[in-house]
């Protein structure tokens, strides 16, 4: 277990979206866009819809699988892009992409002057 983490494997405590949940989420996004005029979602709302952590969402954004728009210093996710992401199955490679992204951050940090390799 990494230092500072409460759980060995956080994935065990979060469940992926089932096909029924995917369909309901997309229907909800479309309904919110049509009726309520909600066209953008915050990062927190996006994490809740996708059942993912902020780190996983950062990885999704870093891999250009989901678009984000910057409004007055706050990132928002368009509803149509979020719906398209939900309809595509990305669960298989998400953990590998997250690990790759975290390793890239470690490599960048190690290349900075004054940072030890440990």
Image: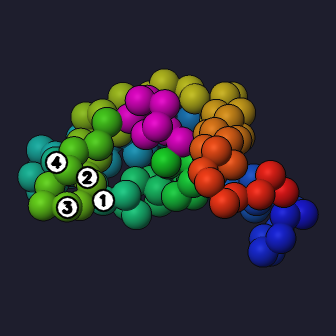
Q: Nearer the viewer, residue 30 or 76?
A: 76
Q: Which label is found at residue 73? A: 3
State which region is magenta. 59-66
Q: Locate the N terminus by quadrant.
A: bottom right
Q: CA distance from mark 3 to mark 4?
A: 17 Å
Confirm whether the magenta stretch covers residue 103.
no
In this view, the mark in front (3 or 4): 3
Q: Secondary structure at mark 4?
A: loop
- The reply to whether residue 23 is in sight is no
Mark 1 or 3, closer to the camera: 3
Secondary element at tag 2:
strand
**Where is mark 4, residue-wise?**
39
Q: How far apart are labels 1 and 3 at the CA level?
A: 12 Å
Q: Nearer the viewer, mark 4 or mark 1?
A: 1
Tell me the distance, in whole angstroms, between the alpha carbons under discs 2 and 3.
10 Å
Q: Compare marks 3 and 4 and give the one earlier in the sequence.
A: 4
Residue 113 to residue 92: above or below: below
Residue 42 is labelled as: 1
């Amino acid at each position: 277990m990494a230092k500072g983490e409460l759980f060995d494997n956080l994935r065990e405590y979060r469940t992926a979206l089932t096909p029924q949940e995917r369909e309901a989420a997309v229907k909800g996004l479309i309904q919110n866009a049509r009726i309520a005029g909600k066209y953008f979602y915050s990062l927190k709302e996006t994490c809740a819809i996708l059942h993912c952590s902020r780190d996983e969402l950062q990885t999704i954004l870093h891999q250009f699988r989901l678009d984000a728009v910057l409004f007055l210093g706050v990132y928002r996710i368009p509803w149509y892009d979020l719906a398209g992401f939900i309809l595509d199955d990305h669960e298989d490679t998400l953990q590998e992409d997250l690990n790759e992204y975290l390793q890239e951050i470690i490599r960048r940090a190690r290349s900075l002057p004054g940072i030890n390799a440990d």
